[in-house]
Amino acid sequence: MNILQASAVSNLKNSNILRLKLQGEGERASVGVPQKDKQGSSYLFVVAILALSVVSNAQTTFPAPVEIGNLEQNLWTTMAEGDFTAVRSLFTKDFIQVNEKIQAADAILVNLKHCRLESYELRDLQVRILSPDSALTAYHVVDTFNCGTEDHPEVKKNDNNSITVWVRQPNTKKWLVQAHTETPTSLAK
């Protein structure tokens, strides 16, 4: 009788990922379709287990750091473009930002309507994968906002260290911003 076992496989990216390995009697140690014999249900059992492992693997696949870095870059580009519906769609419903104030997503959108993001530069962007469904970015951002009018521009320059927490939405591949912080590295000009 074949036994389905989970065994840890050495993986340079993550050594905690489990792979299924079917071990049989004798020298047979590969996944295969059981021959029809007295145990006709063993075929269905193996198919069911393999199907479940595919579903389980989809929920425990760790994101690539470059994927999360691209999400961060897209967030800033979307804010600079001024498409507020698109910006809102990148935040979770219970998003929170912490800087000199604690704000929800709607307050951020009001600020973006009054102060247009004119330029930004993300420096030393680093990504940390926390789990299959969460990651954070840490980076230095230099940005310029215009909070005035065309006739009377009011330019604000910021120099911050920031952290953004990204979470994958349940049963999807969609990532949203859960939290964001900004800490000034120097006095704003």
Image: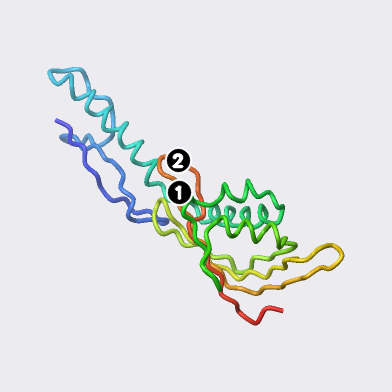
Image spot of residue 173 (x, y percent): 48, 42
Q: CA distance from mark 2 to mark 1?
A: 7 Å
The quarter of the picture where residue 160 lies is: bottom right
Judge by depth and name the residue closer to the eye, 53 or 22: 53
Q: Is residue 29 left or right of residue 158?
A: left
Disc 2 vs disc 1: Cβ atoms closer than 8 Å? yes
Image mark for residue 108: none
Q: Secondary structure at mark 1?
A: strand
Instruction: Give the residue displayed 55% in from the left and 55% down from the top.
Output: 66
Q: Nearer the viewer, residue 148 or 48?
A: 148
Q: Which residue is mark 2?
A: 172
- Residue 14, position in %: x, y? 38, 55
Taking the spot 69% from the left edge, 68% from the top edge, the residue there is: 143
Above-or-below relation of 146 to 26: below
> Please, what is the three-letter code of the amino acid marked with disc 2?
Thr
From the viewer's perspective, is residue 131 above or below residue 3? below
Quadrant location of the N terminus in the rendered image: top left
Q: Which residue is the site of mark 1?
A: 168
Graded by Cα atoms within 10 Å as few (under 14), some (14 to 19) or many (20 or more), the crowding at tag 1 reads many
